[in-house]
Image (cartoon, helix red, strand yellow):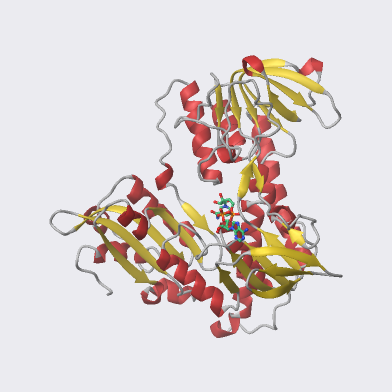
Amino acid sequence: MVPTAENQGHFDVVIVGGGPGGYAAALYGAAAGLQIALVEKDKVGGTCLHRGCIPAKELLETAHVYRTVTDSAKYGVVSSEPKLDFSTTMARKQEVIDQLFNGLSGLIKSRKITSYAGTGRLGAGRSVTVTGADGSSAEISGDVVILASGSVPRTIPGFEVDGRVVLTSDEVFELTELPARVAVIGGGAIGCEFASMMSDLGSEVTVLEALPQILPGVDKDVVSVILRSFKRRAIDVRTGVRVLGHTPGHTGTTIQLEGSDDLEVDAVIVSVGRKPLSDNLGLDGTGVTVDERGFVVVDQLCRTAAEGVFAIGDLVATPGLAHVGYAEAILVIKQLLGEPAVPVDYGKVAWCIYCHPEVAFVGLSEQAAVDAGYDVVTSKHRWMGNSRALIVGETEGLVKVIAEKGPDGAAGRILGVHMAGPWVTEQLGQGYLAVNWEATVPEVAHLIQPHPSLSENFGETVLSLTGRSLNS
Ligand code: NAD
């Protein structure tokens, strides 16, 4: 709806931002019968659908297909050498986005959610001014306002994004050709996904990470798997490096690094984290507070300091994951409905990184468990001994389970499940339930896994923590 004087109104809930946090709040609230206004300046779906999770995973799937075709001869399926048609790759990525966007837009309409096309700014008394691209505006208000304006890529000094040689995740999804040589600055989730995808599609990739380790916070055994795989695929991972700046040339650019030779590349992808979009929300004078990094300050129920104003998703300093935004949206709507609302346990959310091999984990890493004072016992099982992994042809990686050692020395509560390997992002569910249900090793070891299956590896890892196992 265009924001005009005729389109003013009062709603049960006004939501600013139509990404995963905002649209989940709208859909869940509307399903419960609430009158909802959803304000979005661009397209519903947000970063996740248009410039984040969905296009990244779609392009990683292209990389998977490419690897499969490259390796097909070992199955006796002989084909000619694969060739990448990048325009078709990007067109398919867009088709997936469009289909999901149409589905989401249809759901929003069918649930009678009032959509406002424009930028929302919070005012006094839970009012929101919506300004359209043409300058038209409407004043709407809600019993409650949910701020869900999301985040944008962080940049670093000396690497101004030009969309030509210096890119963030936003620009990568708009590329018209694959750069031959790429530097990825930042070896976090986004950096490792892009490094893996571009290398598999044929780029020469260098990862430049400031810290001593890529994938900070991830269990060291899992990081080792990724490092080994990246090395085997000639992805040059450099840790503890400081990038000083770059000098653009005719086509690419030359990056200056502290203490080592310059690096010539065709494109630089800056993936050094994301920053919240709180600047233009009109928060001054509303009582909503913002921390020094720009995150809106909330309590464990996502309540801001202003009565009736909530904030969720990447706008708040909780894990920047779409599914965390969903959980926070449901948490807020349940409070509005007067239903019991249990705060999100941020230490036990599922983390999935879709590089190759995939990474998935929940709960404490071994180091984090030790640091937290637990007496821990761990078990690791590699995929090499798993029949389905051999069949699938993907045996890199492992499953690692971290449990608390009981007073009798036996493995008790499961504290963390950390995996790298084939389809682990789809397999994490069991670990997620175990950690969040605070299940013990004997309880989970009692459960049966289908054979042959990849999930047997989790079962085996837990079984071996009982002191006996089948395959090790
Ligand atoms: P991140 O915080 O996960 O990683 C950023 C990395 O950049 C860190 O390793 C950091 O040490 C490094 N870094 C920072 N400044 C640097 C510099 N000047 N030079 C070199 N390295 C530098 O951030 P991200 O990977 O950009 O992801 C952003 C957000 O998106 C995160 O919240 C992430 O959880 C989320 N995300 C998640 C997934 C997933 O779970 N699959 C995928 C993509 C993004």
Q: Looking at the image, which residue sits at the far front?
A: 259
Give 207 or 458, whichever is nearer the viewer. Answer: 207
Q: Quadrant of ligand 1?
A: bottom right
Total labels: the figure holds 0
Viewer can see residue 450: no
Q: Residue at x 16, y 59 (%)?
A: 409
The quadrant holding residue 27 is top right
Picture quarter with the C terminus: bottom left
Picture quarter with the N terminus: top right
Give 241 or 429, whichever is nearer the viewer. Answer: 241
Is residue 307 left or right of 178 when viewed as pictured? left
Q: Looking at the image, which residue sits at the far left?
A: 408
The location of residue 71, given as percent across then percent down, is 59, 80
Q: Residue at x 64, y 20 (%)?
A: 285
The location of residue 274, given as percent across then percent down, is 62, 48
Viewer can see residue 268: yes
The quadrant holding residue 12 is top right
Give 374 or 21, whichever is nearer the viewer. Answer: 374
Is residue 362 left or right of 183 when viewed as pictured? left
Is residue 85 left or right of 186 when viewed as pictured? right
Q: Residue at x 74, y 16 (%)?
A: 8
Tell me if residue 187 comes above or below residue 328 in the rendering.
below
The quadrant holding residue 445 is bottom left
The location of residue 195, given as percent across then percent down, is 62, 67
Tell me if residue 354 comes above or below residue 397 in the rendering.
above
